[in-house]
Image (cartoon, rainbow, N blue to C red):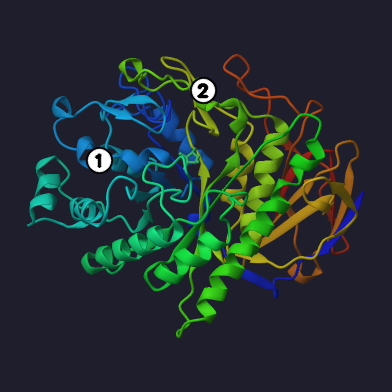
Amino acid sequence: PHASLTIDPAFVVGAIDRRLFGSFVEHLGRAVYDGIYEPDHATADEDGFRKDVIELVRELGVSTVRYPGGNFVSGYRWEDGVGPREQRPRRLDLAWHSLETNEIGLDEFARWSAKAGTELMLAVNLGTRGVQEALDLLEYANVRSGSTLSDLRVANGTPEPHGVVLWCLGNEMDGPWQLGHRSADDYGKLAAQTARAMRQLDPGLKLIACGSSNRQMPTFGAWERTVLEHAYDEIDYLSCHAYYHETPGDLPGFLASPVDMDRFIESVVATIDHVRALRPGRRRVDISFDEWNVWYVDRYHEEDKVTDPQVWPIAPRILEDSYTVADAVVVGGLLMSLLRHADRVTAASMAQLVNVIAPIMTEPGGPSWRQTTFFPFATTSRLARGVTLSVDVATSTYETAAYGDVPVVDAVATHDASAGETAVFLVNRSVDSPATVSVDVRGLGAATVAEAVTLWDDDVHARNTLDHPDRVGLRPTPSAAIDGGTLRVELPPVSWTAVSLR
Ligand code: AHR
């Protein structure tokens, strides 16, 4: 296959918000305990955090970290996680049938987040709790001192307020599995009340209401509309969540997952703008795509959960997907979809960060390593700066059962005028043929190729494991060269490529 496109810095989609490169740490499996936190590990710092993991998070280029859930948050009492550790209760986590020791809570996690160079995005529990508890948490977290809960934080050893700006108003409240699951009407009212109350304390917050848990939910679309009718004027973002996985025998369909993400985003934008059109004022609500990734969700069965709460485990090995080259190509493509909608998707979180459906894996007492999906994220976060440019890719299509005809080659370009840098991200979805791409770059003046890397492998199911942590990595792309105002690059089958021009 062949593809051609033109890059012109005059055609701008929107500014790329750094919050697009967020991630997510839930109290789930080994994300926190034996993930970011392992006090006995050789690399542990004075707070018990693994320094090797912090270094990998920095290399990954993560901007925000959503915490503490996920489904976990809908049964969480934030007070359990603050104060003297020896007095913290051990609680049954109904979402994941685990025992939560509360060794890590808000103050510790905020310290970790600062060490990792990330911004904290907090979720409040709107499952088993409501407005008052959200206000209490906000007071504890953000008020400097002089009130009972802010003074409690100071007494607990955190003199400075956490200054959390991003707040999720619950998690996946449309899902019947969610503790305290509600109708759109009930949730919309609660989200609006909670948002109004939180803003009375701190008007500068950025608040995120729950959209649908996924596009396949029977209430998708109607849920968004109803929630927005109640909460539009109180919120800044509506959330989207989406997970994809390869089904055996349908690699071509799996590689087209970003097409689904494009359509998902465009439907939610349409719904937001419909509700906006019905009211006075120009205030815009954006999308926080705060859970997205490849997740082999079928491998985790409800019936695998330990039933007897007497023996619910602490930090079990659950949701520890081991990612393939094909998975990483899809992750690269999903990031391209987010970038393509940079005008309306202004926050996002890859779910999750460590051990649990994660780009970073750890072994207790042992090493940490990069999964295949680490590479497209780290490279995109590093190179996609400035604005997304509008590009029209001329290429052939192929048919998929789920999405109809989809383009074989996908492309996104970003441009940072102040640094004089442009990046092009490319995916070849063909499972058997290389693709030749020509990009008209005359609009960039005298550009040269500064860097070109590709993720591909003869074995599309190759992975990085404890025993072979470096089996898959980025490879140079020797074909990438500019000649007479045209960038030419050859893409191997099932591959993701980034080219940086300067
Ligand atoms: O990320 C794993 C889970 O997926 C989260 O807890 C939940 O919000 C979603 O369903």
Q: Does 331 sit above or below residue 99?
A: below
Q: Nearer the viewer, residue 416 or 294?
A: 294
Q: Is residue 319 visible?
A: no
SS at mark 2 in the image: helix
Query: Which mark's residue is nearer the viewer, 2 or 1?
Result: 2
Q: Is residue 169 visible?
A: yes
Q: Residue at x 59, y 43 (%)?
A: 377
Give the image location of residue 323, x and y in percent. Answer: 64, 29
Give the image location of residue 388, x and y in percent. Answer: 64, 64
Which picture quadrant has residue 247? top right
Q: Quadrant of the C terminus?
A: bottom right
Crowding near the residue tagged with mark 2, few <14, some 14–19, many ≥20 C-alpha atoms within 10 Å: few
Give the image location of residue 373, x and y in percent. Answer: 62, 36
Q: Does 202 sit above or below residue 120?
A: below
Q: Residue furthest bottom?
A: 280
Crowding near the residue tagged with mark 1, few <14, some 14–19, many ≥20 C-alpha atoms within 10 Å: some
Image-based side of 337 in relation to 436, left or right: left
Amino acid type, residue under disc 1 in the picture: Arg
Structural distance between the alpha carbons of marks 2 and 1 = 26 Å
The residue tagged 1 is 77
Q: Nearer the viewer, residue 61 or 350?
A: 350
Give the image location of residue 185, x and y in percent. Answer: 42, 62
Q: Residue at x 56, y 66 (%)?
A: 344
The residue tagged 2 is 303
Image-based side of 314 in relation to 172, left or right: left
Q: Residue at x 35, y 42 (%)?
A: 73
Amino acid type, residue under disc 2 in the picture: Glu
Q: Are marks 2 and 1 in contact (CB under 8 Å)?
A: no
SS at mark 1 in the image: loop
